[in-house]
Amino acid sequence: MNALLIAIAAAAMVWCQPLLAAADPPPGAASCSGCHSPAATNSAIPRLYGRDAADIEKAMAGFRDGSLPATVMNRIAKGFTDEESRAIAAWLAAQK
C-alpha cells in the first residue's frame, strides 16, 4: 500500500512540474535583461529580478511621465501602457 501511495505522489509531482515552472514573460519583459542583467550584483544598472513589483511599476511610471531622470528608460517606458508595465513588473518580481 505504501509503495502505491509513493508511486501516485511521484507521478503527481512529475505531472505538476510544468505547472510550477515560471510563466512565460509578458511582451517586453524579456528585453529588460539586456541591460538589467539577472546576474548583476554590483552595477550602476539595477537588477530587476525579484524586486518589488510596486517599485518597478512606480519607476516605469516616473520614467514615462518624466519625474525620474533617465538616459534611455524614459523612451523605453513610454512604449508601455500602465497594464503592460504592471504585467512586466509582476513577472520580474516573481523571478529569482
Image (tube, rainbow, N blue to C red):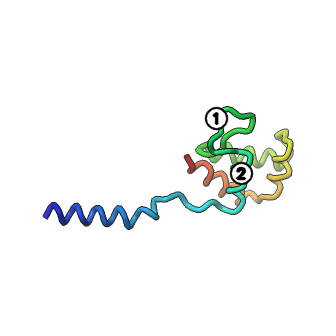
Q: Residue furthest left?
A: 1
Q: Quadrant of the N terminus?
A: bottom left
Disc tally is 2
Kind of residue indicated by mark 1 = Thr
Give the mark, 2 or 1, whose residue is nearer the N terminus: 2
Q: What percent of the width, then of the height, locates residue 83? A: 70, 60
Q: Residue at 73%, 50% (x, y): give it.
A: 34
The one nearer the camera, 61 or 15, is 15
Distance between the Cα atoms at labels 2 and 1?
Answer: 16 Å
The residue carrying mark 1 is: 41
| Mark 2 neighbour class, 10 Å CA radius: few under 14, some 14 to 19, many 20 or more | some
**Cβ atoms at labels 2 and 1 below 8 Å apart:** no
Relative vertical location of residue 91 with respect to residue 11 in this rendering, above or below: above
Q: Is residue 96 left or right of residue 42?
A: left
Using the image, determine if residue 18 lies above or below residue 61: below
Q: Helix, strand, or loop for circle 1?
A: loop
- Check residue 53 in the rendering and tell me which mark sits there, or answer none: none
Helix, strand or loop at label 2? It is helix
Q: Quadrant of residue 44?
A: top right
Query: Residue 6: horizontal and vertical position, in percent?
Result: 22, 61
Residue type of the residue flagged with mark 2: Cys
Name the residue located 68 percent from the left edge and 56 percent from the top edge. 30
Pick the residue in front: 56 or 65: 56
Please state the horizontal and vertical placement of residue 57, each as a whole percent of the image: 70, 48
Taking the spot 70% from the left edge, 38% from the top edge, the residue there is: 46
Which residue, given by chain and number where applicable, does mark 2 sit on?
Answer: 32
The image shows residue 61, relative to residue 69, as above or below, that is: below
Q: Is residue 78 left or right of residue 28?
A: right
Task: Tell me residue 7's x, y (percent).
Answer: 24, 64
Q: Tell me if mark 1 has few (under 14), some (14-19) or many (20+) residues whose alpha carbon lies within 10 angstroms of its own.
A: few
Q: Quadrant of residue 26?
A: bottom right
Q: Is residue 20 left or right of residue 64?
A: left
